[in-house]
């Protein structure tokens, strides 16, 4: 191993783990018979060079960071470094905040392929613009750190990126238009930040994308129709934002989609704008709390792979199609908190299998028929039985001859007769007969 390479390795690690660490004594042959945990090497022209450096408690014998750490210039002296990561290394934002170097990253521009900072709440400051020089970078992960500020537009220079994860930081401002030029991206996760403004239409250029997660931000405006260009997308999560303007019809073009999660947005509109039967790969469909109106189309019941359907907390109306219970893979359906009406026509076996995973409560005008949900059988949780009602036929419903319109809410007894269920009553040349039917009691005037 070249002397300069070895000295750079010892100095770099010492800056993170503390001056007590004496690499030359503990690991005299760091790429040979005394390897350092978290360090990987490869041979080039007969010499060992460091190709990967991983700091933090990843494995049992990994190097733990000291309370006070230092990014030494020797970090940028490695000639073959491909992978650099820090896990749970900078943990105290109040006592020991750590700022990333803004310069010198261009030295690694031709070699570094993976750069990751995971679970470092003490890592503060803004996104280093120097990262935009790492033109060979394929994976950039800044996950669960304390970074803030706006995302720099020069991220668009990282044209070899396959994975971009910036989740759970404090980034704000708009998503740069330049992100749309990263056409090799497979994964984009910008969730759990404070990003705002509209989603750029340039995202339609990410045609290789498999996963797009922008959840838990403040992104607003209409979902761009260009999203329909992402034909390879398997997961689209835009939940917990401020999207509006209805569901874009181009969603039906996402033919590879398995998870569509749009919940908790003021999107509005209805479900009829999308031809749901075209999304036959869907496994998860969560459209809860979107302000949706009108009916639930039967085409949703045609999604044979669907396991989770969330339509709760909207303004949906109409009757429920029994076809929803016939979906072969479904394991959870949530329709609670809507204005659905009528009589549920699902089987007891369906209710027994689903339990509370069938949510239909908080639909005031929804009920299930008598004969379902007895003491030894199952009914839908939180839904009332359809009440028996008494209607008087042959008499003006506005008169006091109807049931409940007499004194004290009883039958009018001007005929000096008393009614007893199941028995004929005679009086004033009038014959009354009561018939009990499954959903109502009819009083027939003969």
Image: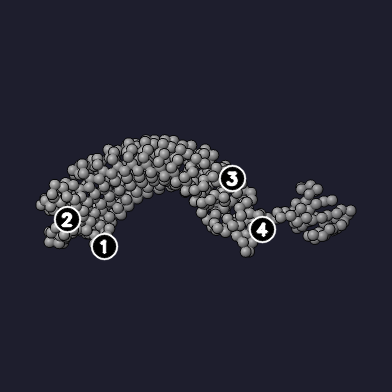
Q: CA distance from mark 2 to mark 3?
A: 68 Å
Q: Is residue 72 left or right of residue 151?
A: left
Give the image location of residue 147, x and y in percent: 29, 49
Helix, strand or loop status at disc 2: loop
Task: From the image, tell me which residue sits under label 1.
Answer: 60
Judge the density around disc 2: few (<14), some (14-19), many (≥20) Cα neighbours within 10 Å. Answer: some
Give the image location of residue 398, x and y in percent: 76, 47
Task: From the image, tell me which residue sits under label 3.
Answer: 317
Q: Nearer the viewer, mark 3 or mark 1?
A: 1
Q: Nearer the viewer, mark 1 or mark 2?
A: 2
Q: Residue at x 21, y 55 (%)?
A: 39
Mark before the other along the chain sequence, 4 or 1 = 1
Task: From the image, tell me which residue sits under label 2.
Answer: 31
Q: Residue at x 32, y 40 (%)?
A: 184
Furthest residue in direction bottom, as rendered: 376
Task: From the image, tell me which residue sits under label 4.
Answer: 371
- In this orientation, does residue 14 appear? no
Q: Is residue 213 left or right of residue 108?
A: right
Mark before the other along the chain sequence, 1 or 2 = 2
Quadrant location of residue 230? top left
Q: Which mark is residue 346?
A: none
Are the two marked residues, 2 and 4, in contact with CB atoms closer than 8 angstroms? no
Are the two marked residues, 4 and 1, in contact with CB atoms closer than 8 angstroms? no
| Nearer to the camera, 371 or 407 | 371
Give the image location of residue 112, x and y in percent: 23, 45
Q: Residue at x 13, y 47 (%)?
A: 45
Q: Residue at x 45, y 40 (%)?
A: 255
Q: CA distance from mark 2 to mark 4?
A: 75 Å
Q: Is residue 364 left or right of residue 427?
A: left
């Amino acid at each position: 191993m070249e002397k300069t390479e070895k000295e750079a390795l010892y100095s770099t690690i010492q800056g993170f783990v503390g001056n007590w660490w004496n690499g030359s004594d503990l690991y005299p042959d760091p790429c040979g018979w005394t390897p350092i945990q978290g360090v990987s090497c490869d041979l080039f022209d007969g010499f060992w060079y460091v190709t990967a450096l991983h700091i933090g408690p990843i494995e049992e014998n990994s190097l733990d960071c000291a309370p006070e750490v230092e990014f030494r210039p020797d970090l940028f002296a490695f000639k073959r470094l491909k992978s650099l990561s820090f896990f749970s290394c900078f943990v105290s934002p109040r006592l020991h905040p750590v700022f990333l170097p803004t310069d010198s990253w261009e030295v690694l521009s031709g070699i570094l392929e993976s750069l990751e900072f995971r679970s470092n709440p003490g890592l503060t400051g803004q996104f280093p613009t120097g990262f935009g020089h790492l033109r060979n970078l394929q994976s950039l992960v800044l996950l669960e750190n304390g970074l803030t500020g706006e995302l720099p537009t020069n991220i668009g220079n990282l044209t070899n990126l396959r994975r971009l994860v910036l989740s759970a930081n404090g980034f704000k401002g708009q998503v740069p238009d330049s992100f749309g030029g990263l056409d090799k991206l497979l994964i984009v996760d910008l969730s759990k930040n404070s990003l705002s403004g509209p989603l750029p239409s340039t995202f339609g250029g990410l045609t290789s994308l498999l996963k797009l997660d922008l959840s838990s931000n403040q992104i607003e405006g209409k979902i761009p129709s260009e999203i329909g260009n992402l034909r390879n997308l398997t997961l689209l999560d835009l939940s917990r934002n401020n999207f509006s303007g209805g569901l874009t019809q181009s969603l039906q073009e996402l033919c590879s989609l398995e998870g569509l999660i749009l919940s908790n947005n003021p999107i509005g509109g209805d479900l009829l704008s999308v031809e749901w039967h075209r999304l036959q790969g869907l496994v998860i469909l969560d459209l809860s709390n979107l302000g949706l109106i009108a009916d639930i189309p039967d085409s949703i019941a045609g999604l044979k792979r669907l396991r989770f359907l969330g339509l709760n907390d909207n303004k949906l109306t109409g009757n429920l199609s029994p076809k929803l219970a016939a979906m072969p893979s479904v394991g959870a359906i949530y329709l609670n908190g809507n204005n659905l009406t009528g009589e549920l026509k699902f089987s007891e076996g369906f209710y027994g299998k689903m339990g509370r995973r069938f949510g239909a409560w908080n639909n005031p005008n929804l009920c299930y028929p008598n004969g379902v949900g007895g003491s030894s059988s199952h009914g839908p949780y939180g839904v009332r039985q359809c009440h028996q009602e008494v209607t008087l036929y042959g008499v003006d419903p506005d008169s006091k001859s109807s049931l409940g319109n007499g004194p004290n809410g009883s039958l009018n007894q001007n005929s000096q007769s008393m009614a007893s269920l199941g028995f004929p009553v005679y009086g004033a040349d009038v014959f009354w007969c009561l018939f009990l039917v499954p959903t109502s009691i009819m009083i027939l005037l003969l």
